[in-house]
Amino acid sequence: MIQLILPLSTRAELNQAERVNINSARVWAMKAGNLKRTDLLTDAFSRELHRRMFNGVWRWAGHFRTTEKNIGWETHRLLEGVRVAFDDAQYWLSNATYPETEIVVRLHHRLVRVHPWPNGNGRHARLMADVILVSRGHEALNWGSRLDLTARGEARIRYLEAIRAADQLDYAPLLAFAVS
């Protein structure tokens, strides 16, 4: 079954359609009313954000993946993984366990590691981190000077190396990338 909604012929067309949707989702998420929501660190908000990021392009937007991948948690544990990530972030924020920028970078890493979506996990996790940070009065992160991390190149290599370092509990490279 074809999961694309739009009739797209090239990867460039797909990337452009996704960018338009993601920008629209960012505008929605950064509205004052949304930033004041009390459910930002929940599965419900996370699904809504993902749906808005990809709903004009993919039929599965806002739905957890149903097939196993070579990365991420098993499909039957995705909801658990997402909830644990959000619960941990809420605890860290409530107890000032780390600086807030580090908390959202750790949340980002956790969400990427769980890998709940068929696609767009990094983009979703970065926007979730930005939403939480902005909701707490900070500026959004730069994430490698806002370069296109879906395209092959040095920025993506640096980002993936930072993710792998975080997999080994070394968050410094990912934090440095996020603020650069």
Image: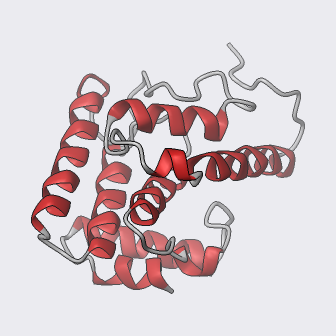
Residue 121 makes an appearance in the image: no
Tell me where residue 54 sits by quadrant.
top right
Please state the horizontal and vertical placement of residue 75, each as a whole percent of the image. Answer: 32, 26
Coloration mode:
secondary structure
Q: Nearer the viewer, residue 77 or 132?
A: 132
Image: 108 above or below 81: below
On the picture, is 78 further left or further right than 51?
Answer: left
Tell me where residue 3 sits by quadrant.
top right
Image: 45 above or below 7: below
Q: Give the residue displayed 28% in from the left and 74% down from the top.
A: 102
Q: Nearer the viewer, residue 23 or 79?
A: 23
Q: Give the residue displayed 50% in from the left and 75% down from the top.
A: 139
Please state the horizontal and vertical placement of residue 37, each as a whole percent of the image. Answer: 41, 43
Direction top: furthest residue? 1
On the picture, is 73 further left or further right than 159?
Answer: left
Tell me where residue 1 sits by quadrant.
top right
Q: Nearer the viewer, residue 152 or 39?
A: 39
Q: Give the residue displayed 37% in from the left and 44% down from the top.
A: 40
On the picture, is 26 further left or further right than 76?
Answer: right
Please state the horizontal and vertical placement of residue 99, each as a whole percent of the image. Answer: 23, 77
Q: Give the residue displayed 51% in from the left and 45% down from the top.
A: 34
Residue 127 makes an appearance in the image: yes
Count all numbered tags in the image, as a single digit: 0
Please state the horizontal and vertical placement of residue 150, each as a whole percent of the image. Answer: 64, 60
On the picture, is 93 further left or further right than 126?
Answer: left
